[in-house]
Image: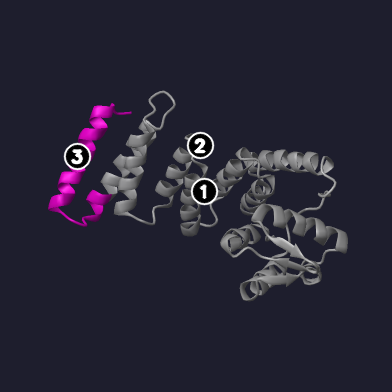
Amino acid sequence: MLSQGKYEEAIDKFEDLLKINVNDPIVIKNLINCLFKYGLYLDDDFTPDYKKAAQCYEKIIKLDKNNTKAWYNLGILSFKLKKYEKAIEFYNKSLKINPKDKYILYNMGLLYEEIKDYVLSLSYYNRSLKIDPSFRYAIQGKRESERMLKMLSESDNDLESINFHSFPKDFVDKLKRLIKISSKIKIEDIGIILHLNKEDVLNLIILWAEKFEFKINGDFLVLNESKLDNFLTYLANCEI
């Protein structure tokens, strides 16, 4: 491992070369590799300088906006600094590039577990396990989120031990299509689409109403337009 000064010297050298040989793929590759190594060096618990580490990953993204690892590392840095909204933003950018990365999905689960959103944490652990059913960390995370959800449901009469987060993909797709064309959904139709009995669908929409600031108006669930993107993302995580 190089010293901090040596990393900075190497980066300066490659940046100077890039000024002369703009878009040279070999220089870009070497610069990105060096920035990654320096970022990880700065991100170490023994030599932490998260601001400089973030700058390394941001430079990589300027060179390669689809570098999923750089977005992912920015997410990890933000998580360490408890900047959860930024971490979610960076993780999502990484997931758009590589939606089947089990580590990104696992870290999203970890983040939502940290902020006590166990429904979403469990959905991300499940997605990670769909990719690798033997992924030990996701298995552990799933167990913990399930334990917390069970504990919460036992302490709240409105929430039964229903699996809120896992439905067949075709069920979820049909519900998403309906939501995109109407902001007022009949509660009975939700039950039919998701194949739930009346008690379970009621528990589910209560959860949604609390989480996404929806309203229940008679036989209808009235969606909050400002939360719609978040709700659609949540539904995408419910697919199995």
Seen from the viewer's position, the closer of residues 70 and 17 is 70
Q: Position of residue 198 (x, y in %)?
A: 87, 63
Magenta run includes residue 14 = yes
Q: Position of residue 224 (x, y in %)?
A: 63, 63
Label 1's element?
A: helix
Seen from the viewer's position, the closer of residues 40 and 193 is 193
* Amino acid on which disc 3 is placed: Asp
Left/right of residue 12 with respect to residue 64 in the rendered view: left
Asked if the residue at tag 2 contacts the one at tag 1, i.e. Cβ–Cβ closer than 8 Å, the answer is no
Residue designated by label 1:
88
* Amino acid on which disc 1 is placed: Ile
Q: At 63% across and 76% down in the image, what residue appears?
A: 181
Label 2's element?
A: loop
Left/right of residue 45 with respect to residue 52 in the rendered view: right
Left/right of residue 187 with respect to residue 43 in the rendered view: right
Seen from the viewer's position, the closer of residues 150 and 205 is 205
Q: At 63% across and 53% down in the image, what residue appears?
A: 127
Q: How far apart are the alpha carbons under marks 2 and 3?
A: 31 Å
Q: Quadrant of the C terminus?
A: bottom right
Residue 12 circle label = 3
Q: How far apart are the alpha carbons under marks 1 and 2?
A: 11 Å
Q: Residues within 10 Å of mark 1 (few under 14, many from 20)?
A: many
Label 3's element?
A: helix
Q: At 15% across and 51% down in the image, what residue appears?
A: 19
Residue designated by label 2:
82
Q: Nearer the viewer, mark 2 or mark 3?
A: 2
Snapshot quadrant of residue 209: bottom right
* Amino acid on which disc 2 is placed: Lys
| Boundaries of the magenta span | 1-28
